[in-house]
Image: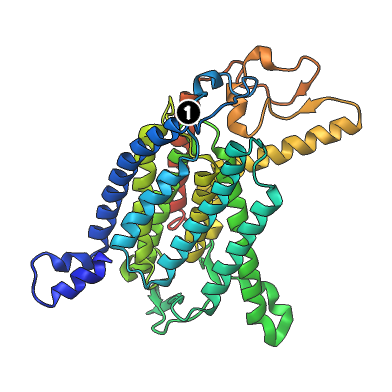
């Protein structure tokens, strides 16, 4: 809203009003506003939740050896993050931008789904919360909306990057002058780094393009479901999901800026996506909201984000990556989330195989994978065979969290570097 106000005032020569057209100015301001809102609103939210006795009442000490200290801590802190990101986005963003609209819809929709899950857990005393099938259905619907919007909206276009011969020994990267709808995405480690989903459906002949969009929409659904649930599993220690997500979103914000700037897009040989600069404003707001949330969520946590936050954050990361056509970088960038999900699936599968043979066996001491590092020696079952017993003792959760952050920083740097490694 303020963007349009100051653009209007610029016509009258009001000093400073011209700054609002600069992405760097609005992005940094969004980060500051989100951080302040998160810190200020967070304090009042925590006091309100404690006054209403809406707090953690159960902690399984077998899973969390430090859990006794966390009884009485408010949950549903994802509300703090959602409020803190929506306020600067609505104030500083160009609200007619299709990409920004998709991010706001993603935030609100998955925030509501996570809120329903937390509400059932806290107020109805059902530890399982919202049934998994309803969460998956909500994520699937969001994926369909995002995928179909990118397909149908005339504003969701790209300028493809192509290599052109210049003389006999030189080549240069240029972008096609005409915008186009495209099912192409950036694929890492490959010189000609555009992969077209329609190439998968070449067997459809004249319907190849339509088939490519169908694959793109299905890929969007899959990415949203995978990353959202991965972030949800990562939310198990104080500051864990908030810190990892802030690092991932910072990297995606850099990639979004590269994609929105024709010079940088040319330099990194990636497609130019006009309008995606508004995603930088949103991403900066999201990073600011998460940093402000960490003020209260770092060990020892004064509030937990709950599914209200974790499901929403994962969906935001996924949709942002899809919009800037960088979803194939997510296995590297979100490797922490991927390992959280894979560890659970492998553990369950390996346990079932052993159960059919009458053998009690596990791959890890406990899953999701971050829980593997805080298992005390006396918590291991003596009649169970473990493939990996490292570490021998339990790490404190603050150490586990910081080491996961460091890993996320390395992965984020590697994801950006892949733009030049091909």
Is residue 21 found left or right of 240 in the rendered image? left
Q: Residue 1: x, y in percent?
A: 28, 66
Residue that extends furthest to the right in the rendered view of this protein: 357
Q: Does residue 58 appear to the left or right of 282 in the view shown? A: right
Q: Give whichever of 175, 58 is nearer the camera.
A: 58
Residue 105 place in picture, x, y as percent: 48, 62
* Between 43 and 404, the one nearer to me in the picture: 43
Write the residue at 41% across / 85% down.
178
Residue 236: % across, % down: 55, 33
Work out whether 400 lies above or below 252. above
Residue 293 vs 416, above or below: the answer is above
**Residue for point 13% across, 78% down:** 11
Q: Residue at x 85, y 31 (%)?
A: 354
- Closer to us: 114 or 200: 114
Number of numbered discs overlaid on the protein picture: 1
| Residue annotated with mark 1 | 73
Q: Residue furthest bottom?
A: 206
| Circle 1 Cα neighbour tier, 10 Å, few/some/many (<14 / 14–19 / ≥20) | some
Q: Is residue 198 visible?
A: no
Q: Which colour scheme is used?
A: rainbow
- Above or below, 49 relative to 217: above
Q: What element carries label 1?
A: loop
Res. 120 visible in picture: yes
Residue 36 versus residue 304 in the image, above or below = below
Which corner quadrant of the image does residue 25 belong to? bottom left
Q: Decide which of 130, 263 is in the foreground and name it.
A: 130
């Amino acid at each position: 809203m303020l963007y349009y106000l100051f653009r209007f005032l610029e016509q009258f020569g009001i000093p400073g009003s011209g700054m609002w057209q600069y992405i760097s100015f609005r992005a940094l301001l969004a980060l500051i506003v989100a951080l302040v809102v998160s810190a200020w609103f967070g304090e009042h939210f925590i006091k309100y939740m404690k006054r209403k006795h809406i707090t953690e009442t159960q902690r399984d000490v077998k899973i969390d050896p430090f859990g006794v200290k966390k009884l009485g801590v408010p949950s549903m802190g994802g509300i703090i993050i959602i409020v803190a990101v929506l306020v600067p986005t609505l104030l500083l963003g160009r609200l007619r931008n299709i990409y920004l609209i998709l991010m706001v819809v993603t935030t609100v929709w998955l925030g509501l789904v996570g809120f329903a899950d937390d509400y059932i857990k806290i107020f109805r005393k059902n530890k399982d919360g919202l049934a998994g099938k309803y969460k998956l259905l909500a994520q699937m619907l969001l994926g369909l909306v995002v995928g179909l919007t990118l397909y149908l909206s005339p504003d969701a276009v790209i300028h493809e990057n192509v290599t052109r011969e210049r003389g006999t020994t030189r080549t240069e990267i240029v972008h096609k002058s005409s915008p186009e709808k495209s099912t192409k995405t950036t694929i890492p480690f490959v010189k000609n780094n555009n992969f077209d989903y329609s190439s998968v459906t070449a067997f459809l002949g004249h319907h190849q393009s339509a088939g490519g969009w169908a694959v793109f929409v299905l890929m969007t659904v899959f990415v949203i479901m995978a990353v959202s649930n991965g972030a949800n599993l990562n939310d198990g220690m104080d500051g864990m999901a908030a810190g990892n997500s802030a690092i991932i979103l910072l990297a995606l914000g850099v990639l979004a800026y590269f994609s929105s700037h024709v010079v940088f897009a040319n330099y990194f040989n990636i497609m130019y996506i006009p309008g995606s600069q508004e995603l930088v404003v949103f991403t900066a707001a999201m990073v600011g909201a998460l940093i402000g949330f960490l003020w209260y969520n770092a060990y020892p946590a004064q509030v937990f984000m709950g599914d209200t936050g974790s499901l929403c954050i994962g969906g935001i990361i996924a949709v942002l990556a899809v919009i800037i056509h960088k979803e194939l970088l997510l296995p590297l960038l979100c490797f922490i989330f991927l390992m959280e999900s894979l560890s659970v699936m492998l553990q369950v599968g390996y346990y079932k195989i052993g159960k059919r043979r009458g053998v009690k066996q596990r791959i890890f001491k406990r899953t999701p994978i971050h829980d593997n590092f805080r298992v005390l020696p006396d918590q291991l079952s003596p009649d169970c065979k473990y493939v990996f017993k490292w570490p021998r003792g339990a790490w404190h959760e603050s150490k586990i969290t910081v080491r996961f952050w460091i890993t996320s920083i390395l992965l984020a740097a590697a994801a950006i570097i892949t733009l030049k490694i091909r």
